[in-house]
């Protein structure tokens, strides 16, 4: 393999040395088996995503990396554990007890604006998430964090939003959508989410169900959930945050360099994760709705230009303003060029959230023509 080929190979997160404490984890059924080591208590029997992730997060921290996991429901044994998650009927952060099953438990991360009931994973994240975030993203040589101190809070919230909240919701039986617009019948089932994949690690009814077998599968669940959380953290540190300066520079230059109205922004290159940064910048600067960004243009890998509508929320296909006139959407190439009066038009998606043109000038013209037609 050439040096260039070797350097382009993406490191699989499961190969990361940060996961070594999880690979080395010892899981037992009694506190006696744990000996003098620190003990993380959780329940035995069928495991779920939330306690696997709760244990994984703790094992990322120096204080708990060598701890033994004790899987039991014995109250006396749990009392002897240094920290207990997802069992015991108590939530008391000062005493390191993190269960959510007890009557009257209603805790949410309302301080961050969320209202989904917390699972054991959410509770551990609430108390230790910032520490875990700093521990796994710090520079190994210097110990420095990859972003300014105030950004840790932004990332902490973002990870809850894009990763943790779904796990809390699923474990607590919270529907992903409110109301019954579909008549009570889901449009489709999602069985590839992290919680579902953890569920498939549990031994099937016709496989051995001994404690040793289940403990080994639980270790797999901790590695799976911890690996995916680590991938989320590192993706934000290595890709998302470095994009901030790129997006902010383009955002600040949009009125002078692209469109005087400031409603179209041009990025120097495609692939830059811009959505969350645009929403953050607008929130930080208290940009009123009438002055908010509507379209982003950027060059794609083929050398042509894309026009992407800014969504109403990050990741949504609902746009602040759909691209093109309704009769243009779904057209391609010559048919679209003739309809919109812009030769070189490539396509507009039928949903109006993205389109393309052969040139930068044409992409900008397509965005501006849309704004003009909408009277914006």
Image: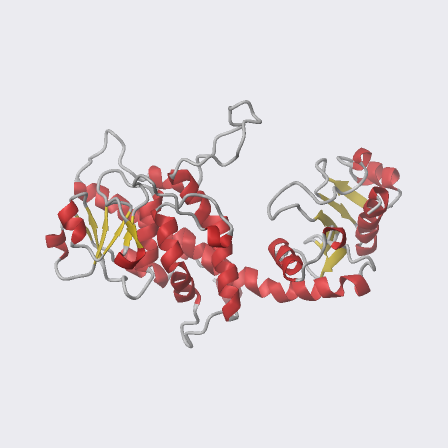
Residue that appears at 52% across and 70% down: 148
Residue that appears at 78% across and 36% down: 331
Q: How is the image coloured?
A: secondary structure
Q: Which residue is at the front of the view, 279 or 210?
A: 279
Q: Which residue is at the front of the view, 126 or 17?
A: 126
Residue 216 x/y as whole percent: 24, 46
Q: Which residue is at the front of the view, 30 or 280?
A: 280
Residue 242 x/y as whole percent: 57, 65
Q: Is residue 328 above or below residue 251?
A: above
Residue that appears at 78% across and 58% down: 262
Residue 266 x/y as whole percent: 74, 58
Q: Is residue 301 above or below residue 208?
A: below
Q: Can see residue 10?
A: no
Q: Is residue 131 above or below residue 214?
A: below
User: Splitting the image into 4 quarters, where does residue 26 fall?
Assistant: bottom left
Q: Can see residue 94?
A: yes
Residue that appears at 16% across and 54% down: 80
As drawn, the residue found furthest toward the bottom would be 142
User: Splitting the image into 4 quarters, where does residue 46 fall?
Assistant: top left
Q: Which residue is at the front of the view, 120 or 228?
A: 120
- Side of 302 relative to 179 (left or right): right
As drawn, the residue found furthest toward the left would be 32
Total number of numbered labels? 0
């Amino acid at each position: 393999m050439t040096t260039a080929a070797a350097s382009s190979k993406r490191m699989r997160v499961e190969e990361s040395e940060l996961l070594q404490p999880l690979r080395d984890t010892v899981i037992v059924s009694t506190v006696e088996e744990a000996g003098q080591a620190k003990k993380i208590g959780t329940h035995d029997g069928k495991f779920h995503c939330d306690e696997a992730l709760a244990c994984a997060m703790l094992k990322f921290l120096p204080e708990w990396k060598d701890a033994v996991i004790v899987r039991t429901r014995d109250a006396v044994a749990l009392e002897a554990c240094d920290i207990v998650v997802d069992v015991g009927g108590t939530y008391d952060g000062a005493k390191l007890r993190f269960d959510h099953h007890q009557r009257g438990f209603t805790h949410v991360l309302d301080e961050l604006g969320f209202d989904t009931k917390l699972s054991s994973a959410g509770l551990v994240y609430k108390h230790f998430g910032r520490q875990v975030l700093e521990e796994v993203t710090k520079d190994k040589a210097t110990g420095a964090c990859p972003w300014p101190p105030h950004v840790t809070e932004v990332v902490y919230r973002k990870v809850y939003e894009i990763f943790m909240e779904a796990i809390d919701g699923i474990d607590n039986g919270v529907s992903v959508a409110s109301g019954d617009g579909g008549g009570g019948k889901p449009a489709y089932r999602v069985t590839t989410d992290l919680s579902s994949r953890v569920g498939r690690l549990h031994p099937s009814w016709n496989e051995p169900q001994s404690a040793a077998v289940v403990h080994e599968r639980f270790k797999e669940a901790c590695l799976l959930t911890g690996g995916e959380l680590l991938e989320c953290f590192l993706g934000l540190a290595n890709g998302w945050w470095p994009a901030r300066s790129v997006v902010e520079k383009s955002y600040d230059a949009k009125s002078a360099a692209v469109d005087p109205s400031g409603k179209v922004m041009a990025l120097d290159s495609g692939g830059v994760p811009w959505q969350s940064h645009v929403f953050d910048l607008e929130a930080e600067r208290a940009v009123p709705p009438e002055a908010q960004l509507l379209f982003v243009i950027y060059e794609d890998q083929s050398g042509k230009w894309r026009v992407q509508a800014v969504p109403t929320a990050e990741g949504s296909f609902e746009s602040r303003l759909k691209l093109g006139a309704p009769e243009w959407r779904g057209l391609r190439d010559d048919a679209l060029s003739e309809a919109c009066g812009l030769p070189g038009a490539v396509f507009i998606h039928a949903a109006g959230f993205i389109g393309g043109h052969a040139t930068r000038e044409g992409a900008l013209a397509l965005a501006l023509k849309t704004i003009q037609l909408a009277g914006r």
